[in-house]
């Protein structure tokens, strides 16, 4: 009898062991009684359902019940319907009386959604846009790759981030419309990008021509710059149809001796250009005030010299630099520009377009006046003096009227739009500077009223250095107010503990003598640390103030 029971026990144990590795499962003491489940392994995709079927023998032995070890991954109802809910792995346990069976459920969760932080974007030529893709769901467990493409690589260049493939920089190369697409797995999202190159005028080829009476010459008009995105309709008109006519294709037909002008500068716009330059200067002054820079400060004096250098580089500029000024500018650049100086010079650069447009317009006016003067002289040679002088003056008057009144295409409207856009950009820069100033003041107020800062002040009054616990508290305070400060530092250079402590104290505006006391080092050591870190990170010598300014800018 004992031998029979032992045999039955072995058979039952073998049957239980088989449930983990077969699809058809029978758990019981013999072929006639047990628990049968149609799968030991299910591989589902998130959202799928599958019905497990359990059969209990002999009939009437008991009802099968189903439970999921992790119902958040896959749930099962009392009829065995399995629903895949999120990526992962779980086990469905089926029981009936003393019988038990397990089915492993593996849920695959591929990429199903991709979105971009911008659906549409407008850039100026040379500007850069950061695109960030959000890839979902959050339980993805199926490997995938991310690719970025530009529909027209001549318009923009897309550079994926080396560390974060879901981020890419889009650089505007030329005027036009294109689309940037990011694809993750089999799902994609697109951002429509317009590189807005403004029309500043038109070109006519050839710029001058000679024709005999009855002969023709074909003129061709084009946009300036050639990649301006605006659609332009060109219209042609002769300043004197008795001398030559021009049709709407630009075909000129000569009639009699004389000189006419078929392409005239937009003299009226020069006044608008000068007003725009003044608007930029006004905004730079407001930016200085919002940035907290004194008008008589060394930083502002250096900026004015740098601005003079930039203005001297404008085409047609009459500004000249002395040798002493050039040497001073070289010294300033060697030292490094502050963030305020860089931002203000970027605003100054916006004047280049208007200044050079004024210079170009003045050159064109001079050229046309020379043509008109030449016409006057030739007429005086071949006609009676009185009649010739009267006729030449009529030519001068008519040409002058054309110079003032003729508009090239629709360029004036486009220029007005650009002026407004530049004003908006400058206003935005001032607003951002004001916001940053307010944020900086709030952050410093939070620091100066914190328990950590007050404790540091107490240590200074007692002439004591900081403990490890106090350094940790200070690091947590700085990180809570300037998020990412520590990561940014360590991404630039592997700092020692003392290096990091010095940077923390600079960030809360401690003086060098106080830093020396709190770190238990000499003032000379603190100064050496600051200049050494500057050289390590920037690859050139720098002052302790330059390092402090860098830390405060992070």
Image: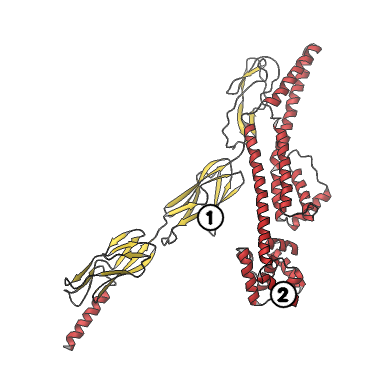
Residue 50 drawn at (x, y percent): 29, 61
Task: Indicate which label's residue lies in the foreground, 1 or 2.
Answer: 2
Pointer 1 or 2: first along the chain: 1
Q: Taking 385 as reference, is 230 left or right?
A: left
Residue 55 drawn at (x, y percent): 21, 68
Q: Is residue 411 above or below residue 30?
A: above
Q: Is residue 325 at all visible to an observer of this figure? A: yes
Neighbourhood count class around disc 1 (C-alpha, 10 Å): few under 14, some 14–19, many 20 upward: many
In the picture as drawn, the residue positioned furthest to the bottom comes out as 2
Q: Real-space Cα distance between discs 1 and 2?
A: 46 Å
Q: Is residue 459 above or below residue 226?
A: below
Q: Quadrant of residue 30?
A: bottom left
Residue 416 drawn at (x, y percent): 65, 35
Cβ atoms at labels 1 and 2 below 8 Å apart: no
Neighbourhood count class around disc 2 (C-alpha, 10 Å): few under 14, some 14–19, many 20 upward: few
Mark on residue 272?
A: none
Q: Taking 110 as reference, is 541 left or right?
A: right
Residue 383 drawn at (x, y percent): 78, 12
Q: Secondary structure at mark 2?
A: helix
Residue at 25% across, 79% down: 13
What residue is pinned by disc 2? Answer: 458
Q: In this figure, what is the number of numbered marks?
A: 2
Quadrant containing the C terminus is bottom right
What residue is pinned by disc 1? Answer: 167
Q: Quadrant of residue 491?
A: bottom right
Quadrant containing the N terminus is bottom left
């Amino acid at each position: 009898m004992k031998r029979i029971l032992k045999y039955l026990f072995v058979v039952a144990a073998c049957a239980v062991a088989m449930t983990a590795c077969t699809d058809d499962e029978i758990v019981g003491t013999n072929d006639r009684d047990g628990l049968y489940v149609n799968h030991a392994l299910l591989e589902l995709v998130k959202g799928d359902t599958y019905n497990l079927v359990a059969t209990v023998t002999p009939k009437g032995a008991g009802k099968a019940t189903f439970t999921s070890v992790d119902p958040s991954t896959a749930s099962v109802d009392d009829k065995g319907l399995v629903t895949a809910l999120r990526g992962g792995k779980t086990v469905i346990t089926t029981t009936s009386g003393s019988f038990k069976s397990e089915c492993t459920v593996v849920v695959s969760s591929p990429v199903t959604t991709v979105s971009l932080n911008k659906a549409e974007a407008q850039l100026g030529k040379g500007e850069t846009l950061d695109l960030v893709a959000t890839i979902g769901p959050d339980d993805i467990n199926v490997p995938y790759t991310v690719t970025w493409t530009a529909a027209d690589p001549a318009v923009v260049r897309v550079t994926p981030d080396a560390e974060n493939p879901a981020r890419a920089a889009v650089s505007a190369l030329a005027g036009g419309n294109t689309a940037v697409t990011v694809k993750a797995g089999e799902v994609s999202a697109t951002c429509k990008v317009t590189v807005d190159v403004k029309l500043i005028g038109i070109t006519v080829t050839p710029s001058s021509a000679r024709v005999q009476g009855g002969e023709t010459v074909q003129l061709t008009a084009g946009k300036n710059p050639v990649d301006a995105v605006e659609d332009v309709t060109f219209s042609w008109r002769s300043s004197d149809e008795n001398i030559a006519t021009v049709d709407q294709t630009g075909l000129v037909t000569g009639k009699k001796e004389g000189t006419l002008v078929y392409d005239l500068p937009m003299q009226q716009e020069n006044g608008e250009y000068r007003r725009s330059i003044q608007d930029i200067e006004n905004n730079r002054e407001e930016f200085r005030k919002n940035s907290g820079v004194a008008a008589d400060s060394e930083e502002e004096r250096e900026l004015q010299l740098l601005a003079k250098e930039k203005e001297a580089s404008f085409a047609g500029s009459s500004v000249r630099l002395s040798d002493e000024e050039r040497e001073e500018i070289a010294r300033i650049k060697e030292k490094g520009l502050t963030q305020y100086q860089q931002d203000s010079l970027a605003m100054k650069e916006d004047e280049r377009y208007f200044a050079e447009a004024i210079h170009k317009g003045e050159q064109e006016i001079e050229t046309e006046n020379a043509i008109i003067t030449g016409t006057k002289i030739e007429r005086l040679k071949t006609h009676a003096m009185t009649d010739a002088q009267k006729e030449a003056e009529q030519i001068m008057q008519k040409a002058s009227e054309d110079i003032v009144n003729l508009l090239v295409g629709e360029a004036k409207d486009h220029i007005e739009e650009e002026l407004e856009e530049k004003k908006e950009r400058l206003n935005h820069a001032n607003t951002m500077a004001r916001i940053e100033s307010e944020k900086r003041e709030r952050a410093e107020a939070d620091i100066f009223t914190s328990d950590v800062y007050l404790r540091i002040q107490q240590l200074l009054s007692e002439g004591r250095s900081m403990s490890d616990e106090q350094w940790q508290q200070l690091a947590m305070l700085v990180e809570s107010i300037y998020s990412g400060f520590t990561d940014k530092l360590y991404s630039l250079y592997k700092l020692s503990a003392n290096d990091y402590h010095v940077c923390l104290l600079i960030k809360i505006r401690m003086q060098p003598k106080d830093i020396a006391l709190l770190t238990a080092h000499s003032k000379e050591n603190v100064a050496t640390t600051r200049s050494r870190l500057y050289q390590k990170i920037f690859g050139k010598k720098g002052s302790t103030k330059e390092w402090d300014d860098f830390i405060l800018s992070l």
